Amino acid sequence: MSARLTGRDAFLALLADEGIEHLFGNPGTTELAIMEALGKRADMRFVLGLQESIVVAMADGYARASGRLAACNVHVAPGLGNAMGSLYNAKFCGSPIILTAGQQELGHGLMEPMLYGPLVEMARPLVKWAVEVTRVQDLPRILRRAAKIATTPPTGPVFISLPGDILDGEAELDLGRSTRVEPAVRPADEIVDRLARRLLAASKPVIVVGGEVSRHEAWPECAALAELLGAPVYQQTIADAAHFPSAHRAFMGTLPRQQPKVREILAAHDLMVSIGGDSLRMSVYNPLDALPPGLPIVQVSEADWDIGKNFPAELALNANVKATLEALLPRLRALADPARATAARQNLDHLQKDNWSARRERIYAEAGRASGAQPIDPRYLMGRIAAALPENAVVVEEALTATGALLEVLPYRDPHAFIGLASGGIGFAMGGAIGASLALPGRPVVAVVGDGSAMYSIQALWTAAHSNLPITYVILNNSSYRILKERMVSFRGARSFGGMDLREPAIDFTSMAAAMGVNARSVRDPAEIDTALKTAVASGGPQLLEFVVADGFR
């Protein structure tokens, strides 16, 4: 059924029909039409971010925590420019986001007015599809296509440029209907049989799980696979989500992003089973490959680009991980003989002696020896954070040098319990925690953020306070870019630390938080850690805890 609508009203009606309940944004003059129309809607909440990088980070956090389509709007070319780092993060994670930006009226760009820029060309490298609306009549088709593209695996952000005269234009419009491509695609039965036989032919397989396992909530299927094969399970090198239940006896932890160490781990196996991720993505260059020579790979992923990208896959399945495992498990049970089942149980018993849970207990004991250290030892702090948080807490992580210590002790209790920095581009967690909190109401969110990272997007505190969200920001303040100091020493053998200290003057996080309406406390005494954390989380509102931690170089 068609109706005469303005572009602005049609835009919001289409978003609402696609399931959008929150529109993250930072408006400017070209977005006034949208803001006018929003005032007439009760079914969509506008969430104001004070800088465009925070706007996109909020949408990214929402999409990652909910698994749903998110929407955000930024202001013309400078606003899109501000958002590019966060858009890079969203692309890296495959977050389904419709990003829009207001644009100068069609034809006015020829005059090169202030704030004008080639928005589609700017966005295109970081999105699945980028387009400018040139007719009001095309708005329904474009919005419907954008939502379909963003949510179709491999998911990811899309971009739409909205000229002012399109938003204010009026036409007889049929808004159409939403399209979702069914994601639960699995291989044909003969391929499932081939996969099962290949897995059973391996005597020492290793499973590496990635983001698609948490995204599709395939924990039970992955756990069952590990038990049938008696195989250890590692989280991929990029710990961007809770990929596997940490308490499971097959879980060995996260693969490091160091090629020699990964190679050493994998060398003990005769088959790598990569499920739902880019398993061996590294950070810095090393002449040694992470994959041992001759180690075969079986790979299942909905991201066709990542399959066999760097290392050839003997069996490459472009499919949904949950649907594939649901089909595979019965076939494995039918083919496995009693001797294989006995060997699998024995392997799991052996793994239990040095799995993630066993190492965690040893790490707790070792870190406990630093319980009185001042400044606070980061490893000890990570242990106390893991122990003090309620079981339903969601941790959003951008801890950098403390990330490894956190992953060693933080339990994954459900697929939504952890959201980590994925791309390496810092600035995500402050805004991402807001999106996660809105996506998972009723769950406390704890953002563990380095001081340098926090300063990329500290304005997010205002939005957390404005929305009165149950977020505790844990700022690890070592007054430096410690990761750069560590790499200067380890990579270059030098101690030239210019531009790596955040001192003179010191950054006063508690004062900044208070200025934006967030209760804050600075903690220097390790004896106060547990009480500070529990009190902040129990408050049910936005809190900031600054922990003064050792920088390792003073």
Image (tube, rainbow, N blue to C red):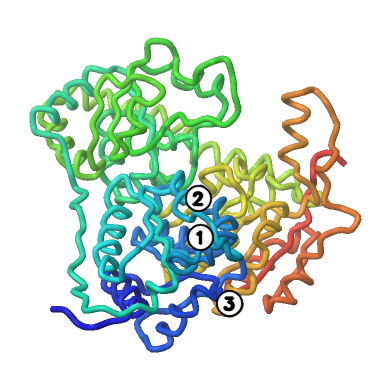
Q: What residue sits right under mark 3 in the picture?
A: 541
Label 1 neighbour load within 10 Å: few <14, some 14-19, many 20+? few
Q: Indicate the position of residue 25 as horizontal and vertical percent values.
A: 51, 70
Numbered label tally: 3
Amino acid carrying label 3: it is Gly
Q: Nearer the viewer, mark 1 or mark 2?
A: 1
For the residue labelled by badge 2, is the local secondary structure a helix, a strand or a loop?
helix
Q: Is residue 4 left or right of residue 430?
A: left
| Residue shown at 40% from the left, 27% from the top | 350
| Residue shown at 60% from the left, 28% from the top | 284
Amino acid carrying label 1: it is Leu
Residue 218 vertical position relative to residue 389 in the rendered view, above or below: above
Q: Nearer the viewer, residue 56 or 146?
A: 146
Q: Nearer the viewer, mark 2 or mark 3?
A: 2
The quadrant of the rendering that contains the C terminus is top right
Q: What residue sits right under mark 2 in the picture?
A: 122
Q: What residue sits right under mark 1 in the picture?
A: 110
